[in-house]
Image (spheres, rainbow, N blue to C red):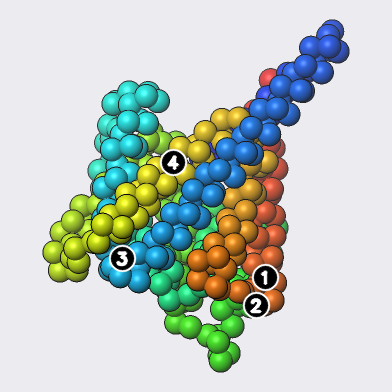
Amino acid sequence: MIILTMLAALPGGCIRRRDSPVVVRRDREVSMSSSLLGILIMCAGVLCLALGDALSKWLGASYDPIQIIFFRTLISLPLIALLARFNGGWQTLRTRRPGVHLLRGLIFTATMFCFITGLTLLPLAETTAIAFAAPLFVALLSGPLLNERVDRVPLIASLVGFVGVLIVVRPGAAGFQWGALIVIGAAVCYALMMITARRYGSKENLWAMVFYATLVPMLVCAVLLPSVWHTPQPLHWLGFCAAGLLGAAAMSCLTLAFRYAPAALAAPFDYTAMIWAVVLGWWLWGEVPDSWVFIGAALIIASGVAIALHERRVAIKARPTT
């Protein structure tokens, strides 16, 4: 979340010059074109994430989540290292806080384990909708964990979002599944990941945080792998490789998107994942969400967008003026 906040604080890219209306118009056209490109790249990254989740759900019917996490991180890690190499050099992976990266890696391991387990128990669209609650937990946990004052807008938005989560989960209803609680656990863990990013993002390089957050789950799952190993079928080998490649491609697209478009403009397009989840779930497994899932998802998404826009306004007000 600190990365989004930092990017949101940057200018939109439009240089205003009173002495040259033509230049202003051209700068605006370039800014609009750049923002459109950023949005398209963001949507491409979200599609990669959705496809990776669909593959994990498919593989989860035959393999333990630990094996899926191992192969996804094993394939993604070298690609992340190469991206770091060409975006600042190997020195970007240096760190003086190995304990912080170890903690973040363990939290991310729990995040992926809960999310993939949830994928095997719930429809894809329902799992995606519940996972969108992560920013809501960030807003609520920032106070006690970071000693930050939670403003009224994020607090109200979070409460509305949790109403949406309850609508999707429907505790006590006949259709309630315990898998929903597991996905909520994934959302909480991911919120802790974003909170640690906010806490240490200004002190650690972005690529170091991404690299070690991928390395630790791979090592943890490598230790546990013999106890759950199941030799993949030839087609499943392709699925494992594709899931890892899609994960790396998604990270690359999301990082690149914020270079072309302001975070406040690009970030809400993360919720296009709900569209892909509905389409892929219906196409691959015949899953058709009921109206309550769509209503709850709409409340969750609206709350997340409200929090993102609020943080954008706060970042603009905090920006030094000269």
Pinpoint residue 217: horizontal percent, then vertical percent. Answer: 27, 54
Q: Quadrant of residue 226?
A: bottom left
Mark 3 or mark 1, which has the lower sequence index?
A: 3
Amino acid type at circle 3 is: Pro
| Residue behind mark 1 | 294
Dot 3 or dot 4: first in sequence order is 3
Q: Which residue is mark 4?
A: 249
Give me the residue at 37% from left, 49% from top.
242
Residue visible at 62% across and 53% down in the picture = 272
> For residue 110, which numbered disc appears in the image?
none
The nearer-to-camera label among 2 and 1 is 2
Q: Position of 227 compared to 146: left or right?
A: left
Q: Is residue 109 left or right of residue 137?
A: left
In the depicted structure, whether residue 302 falls above or below residue 22: below
Q: CA distance from mark 3 to mark 4?
A: 21 Å
Assess disc 3: are there few (<14), some (14-19) or many (≥20) residues with their C-alpha within 10 Å of its C-alpha: many
In this picture, residue 227 sits left or right of residue 105 = left
In-front residue for pair 279/145: 279
Q: Position of residue 43 (x, y in %)?
A: 59, 45
Q: Is residue 306 visible?
A: yes
| Disc nearer the start of the sequence (2/3) | 3
- Residue identified by numbered label 2: 290
